[in-house]
Image: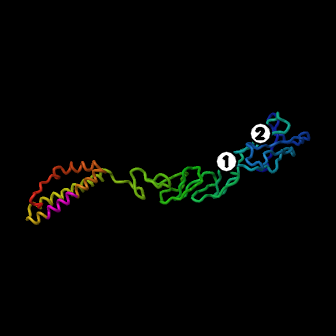
Amino acid sequence: APHPHLGLQDLSGNDIQRQDPGLSVLMAQATVHPKPASKESKDTFVANYEGGLFAFQDVQFKAAYGTVYHLRFTLAAMPNVTGTTSRAVTAQQCKRDEFYVPGDLKCRKCLEGAICNSSQHLLTQAGYWRIDNVTLNFLQCENAACLANQSAGGCAIGHQGLLCSQCEEGRSGDSCTVCGSKGWGWTTIVVLLVAYLLLISITAVLAMHTDANTRKALLNMTGKQLVSYLQILGITQSSFPIVVANVFQVGGSMTTFAFPVAGLQ
C-alpha cells in the first residue's frame, strides 16, 4: 500500500494508543531494501507521530521485476528502539498477455510464438520451438512436430534436434516413423539375388533340351544374365559384403554351370 501506518508499543508489547504531546516530536523512517534499481526512485520515506500513529504518505518506488523488497521502519535519532519490517513488496503484476524479464522496470508484450501468463515463464505455441527456457527467440517449425506448452525444445515422439527437424535413431521419413528391421532388408536383397541366380539356372537347363538355334539363343541370353548377375554381386560386395556371403551360402552349388562349347558357337 502507498500509505502504510505504523504504531508504537511499550516494553510489554502493548499498543500505545493515546496522543502524548511528548511523542509528537518523534519521526519514523522507512527505508527500501534492497535499494531500487532506478536511481531516480526514492528509497527513504519519513512520517511524524500524529493521532497515535506514524502515517506515511505516497510510499512509491520503481521496483524491478523478479526482486522482493521490504520496508524497514526505524525511529529517527532513537537507535535503541527496535524497528520492524514490512511484508514483501514486489512490482505490480503484469497483464495476462504480458511477461517480464527479471530486472525489468516494466512489463513486455508477449512474443510471437510464445504463451504468456503475466510472469517471467514463457511457453511455446504449437508449431514453435526454443532452444532453452531463457532465450526470447521463438522459432517457427517447418513441420508439426514442435509441441505447445513447452518451456524449451519439446518435440513429438520420434523427433529431436533443432526445430524438431531430425529423427531419433531407428526412425525415418517426414513423420519419423519406425524403420523396418535391417535384418529383413538384407534378407530381401539375398532372396532377390538368389531368385535371379535361379532364373539363370533354369534358362541354362532349358537350353540343354531344345534345338540348336534355340539353345544358342538361350545360352547367349544366359551368358548376358550371368554377366549382369556378376556385376550386381560386385556392386553389392563393395557395400554389403555380408549379403554377398549369404547369397553364396544360400545359393550353394547353384552358381556352378557347365556350358556346352558347341552351343556357344
Q: Which label number is shown at residue 96?
A: none
Q: Position of residue 214 (x, y in %)?
A: 11, 65
Comparing 18 with 120, the one in front is 120
Say which quadrant the C terminus sits in. bottom left
Q: Position of residue 176 (x, y in %)?
A: 41, 56
Binning the other alpha carbons within 10 Å of mark 1 as few (below 14), some (14 to 19) or many (20 upward) gives some
Q: Which label number is shown at residue 84?
A: 2
Disc 2 marks a residue whose amino acid type is Thr
Comparing 15 with 119, the one in front is 119
Dominant secondary-structure state across the stretch colored magenta: helix
Residue at horizontal 72 percent and vertical 45 percent from the top: 69
**Relative to residue 215, is residue 62 drawn left or right?**
right
Query: Helix, strand, or loop for circle 1?
Result: loop
Residue 106, by quadrant, is: bottom right
Q: Position of residue 10 (x, y in %)?
A: 82, 36
- The residue labelled by disc 1 is 66
Query: Helix, strand, or loop for circle 2?
Result: strand
Residue 208, by quadrant, is: bottom left
- N-terminal of the pair, mark 2 or mark 1, is 1
Residue that extends furthest to the front in the rendered view of this protein: 265
Q: Position of residue 219 (x, y in %)?
A: 14, 61
Comparing 265 with 141, the one in front is 265
Q: Which residues are magenta?
A: 217-227
